Amino acid sequence: MGLLELFLLAVGLSMDAFAVSICKGISIGRAKIRHALIAGLWFGAFQALMPAIGFFLGVQFERYIQTVDHWIAFLLLAMIGINMIREGVRGEEEESDPSVSARAMFPLAVATSIDALASGVALSAAGGDILWAALFIGLMTFSFSFAGVKAGSGLGSAFGAKAQIAGGAVLCIIGLRILIQHLLGGI
């Protein structure tokens, strides 16, 4: 796989994490550099780890993950999105900023990186240096996620509960898109 193909793969895999990071920034409101770093590290680490796992498990694991990955991503993102919408409608405020805690970030990182696991399986079939590819994908995702939190924070500060409701809706739509794409054969 050439550098251009790897770049395009990394950008494509980063987009869900970028969208979720924008939603995180919206829900945080006034995000600090620390929030953006934490989100970037969670998403970047999982986007780097999953292709490596997929690569090492190889083609044998592909059929198992492809049968359930879209359902896992859909359920995780829908549950988190519905909760964000509920909190926005009720005007609930998060206490002591749990939005970047391990409990909040882990399911998001998993949900947005399941497709990276499948791409690792594909990379194993194509050959190449998985360590370089995983590092590149992770750094790209870190960058997009960091920027997403900061961009979302500006939106959240300006629009408050409406932005949180919109962010929750975006998470639900991303989950639904993942589910529909897989059910319809990857359109």
Image (cartoon, grey):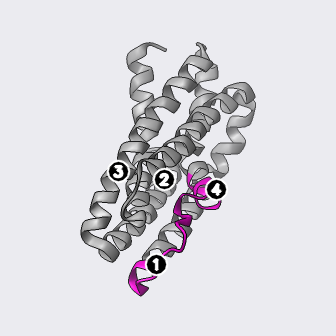
In the rendered view, would you say 156 is above or below 7?
A: below
Q: Which residues are magenta?
A: 86-108
Callout 2 secondary element: helix
Q: Nearer the viewer, mark 1 or mark 2?
A: 1
Q: Nearer the viewer, mark 4 or mark 2?
A: 4
Per the rendering, the mark at residue 93 is 1
The residue located at (57%, 49%) in the rendering is 109
Nearest the viewer among 179 and 100 is: 100
Q: CA distance from mark 4 to mark 1?
A: 19 Å
**Mark 1 to mark 2 CA distance (whole Å):** 29 Å
Residue 103 on the magenta segment: yes
Q: Which residue is mark 2?
A: 178
Q: In the rendered image, which residue does mark 4 sit on?
A: 102
Q: Residue 40 at x, y = what percent?
A: 49, 43
Q: Find residue 96 and report its image quarter.
A: bottom right
Q: Earlier in the sequence, mark 4 or mark 2?
A: 4
Residue 24 located left or right of residue 51: left
Residue at the image position 43 percent from the left and 44 percent from the top? 145
Tag 4 and tag 3, C-beta contact below 8 Å: no
Q: Amino acid at mark 4?
A: Ala
Q: Earlier in the sequence, mark 1 or mark 2?
A: 1
In front of the other: 133 or 71: 133
Q: Which residue is mark 3?
A: 150
